[in-house]
Amino acid sequence: MSRLEVRPQWTWQALARVNRTFRDKKDGLLVGYAPLTEHLYAALAEYTANDQTTKPLGRDIEEALAKVRDLHDTIGNVILSGYDWRAKRAERSPKAFINSVLGTVDYLRDPAEPGNQVDEGEPTLGERFRKESARLARFYALCSSSGGLHGYRDDIAFFEAARIWMAKYDAEERRARGLPVPADVALYLRQLTAGAVEAGGVTDIYEAAGIPRPDLSHLDEAFIAKMQGAQNPHLAIEALRRLVEQQMRKVTRHNVVRQQSFSDRLLSLMTRYTNQHLTAAQVIAELVAMAREVSVDAERGRGFSPPLSDDELAFYDAVAQNESAVTEMGTGVLADIARDLVKSLRRDVTTDWVSRDDVRAKLRSTIKRLLAKHGYPPDAEPTATELVLRQMETFAEEWSPNVEL
């Protein structure tokens, strides 16, 4: 058959069997066929009971053609009305296509755009584009072989390339925050290795932003200038934010206090930028300053005598959260408490301590006893005890007696 004909008698169960068959194949076949099943599921979901009796899919495609034309107009002339993507794409440059795609993505994700400054619950430009471009892809899959789409195909390919890059930035954001990327999104993004966007030679988010891959140990004024002069400034901000988040999670992996502190500050910074209280240049400078601080934080334990290990530093931060404790006791005594806590808690931990109330009660008593022994302020002791227990939970797996380190 020259094209796929979907008959009404195809049931959801049959499609599920097709999908399982594809998933049993090698990755190459899965990549090739997964978009097919995606379009089948989505198209049938939008196919009403009346349609199934009056307009068998694969025979009457006029409705799909009309939907494609309507969605093309909505995306190209409404959602993207504030960005001249046609002129950018028409520039005489080997990279005109990819530059216009990335410029479109920058426009869609830029909080300074009026279309992204919406009331709570209202969709932003980016959200509208994701929804309508996904619908366009589904309807186009049903009528792509039709001769009625002359003059639309190049634009549809352009919108799909922008949709891929939107998904790539969304996935990078999830990875930076330590969240999993949904399997269907990961699969979809593999198109970047074989799709039309690849012809532009850009697959890296830093290249896309027009900046060099940052080295957090060496962020000088020249780097800041390059960031602030990037071709796609908002994409540059997103790329740097991802790097700061990734490094922050690495440095503060077992330190709940510092992780929360950095996370709150980063969220506050980006909120100020989103709300237009900071310019792109200002937020870049702030992100660089935070990146430097995160990089230095990894070596903070060496400033104590004797130096604190990363584990000890995490517990030091837990007991140093109380300002009166720092003032009354000093950093040296608090460091001693941290060393004693690590020794005692590692010794008393059991494999299932997190779920056993009796073991947690014993650990809580150990913490209270050590704090009292060193003269920790009694009024601050309950909060410190609970924070130390929270901190300890991050080490549960590594400190388990049955884990070989």
Image: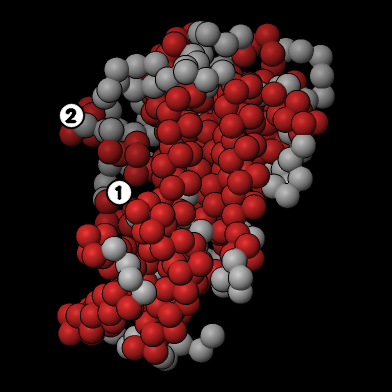
Q: Nearer the viewer, residue 108 or 396?
A: 396
Q: Looking at the figure, which quarter contains the C terminus?
A: bottom right
Q: Residue at x 42, y 20 (%)?
A: 275
The picture places residue 388, in percent across and down from the top left corner, at 34, 68
Judging by the rendered image, the residue that carries numbered circle 1 is 10
How far from the left and from the top, in percent, is residue 115?
42, 14
Numbered-mark total: 2
Q: Please tell me which residue is depicted at 37% across the width and 82% down the height of the picture.
A: 345
| Residue at far front of view | 328
Instruction: Give the amino acid at mark 1.
Output: Trp
Residue 381 visible in this rendered orientation of the protein: yes
Would you call the spot at circle 1 few (<14 residues within 10 Å), some (14-19), or many (20 or more)? Answer: few
For residue 68, the mark is none
- Which residue is the site of mark 2? 50
**Does 124 appear above or below 357?**
above
Along the line of sight, the residue nearer the viewer: 33 or 201: 201
297 vs 332, left or right, is right
The Cα atoms of the two marked residues, 1 and 2, are separated by 16 Å
At mark 1, the secondary structure is loop
Q: Crowdedness of circle 2 by 10 Å Cα count: few (<14), some, many (20+)?
A: few
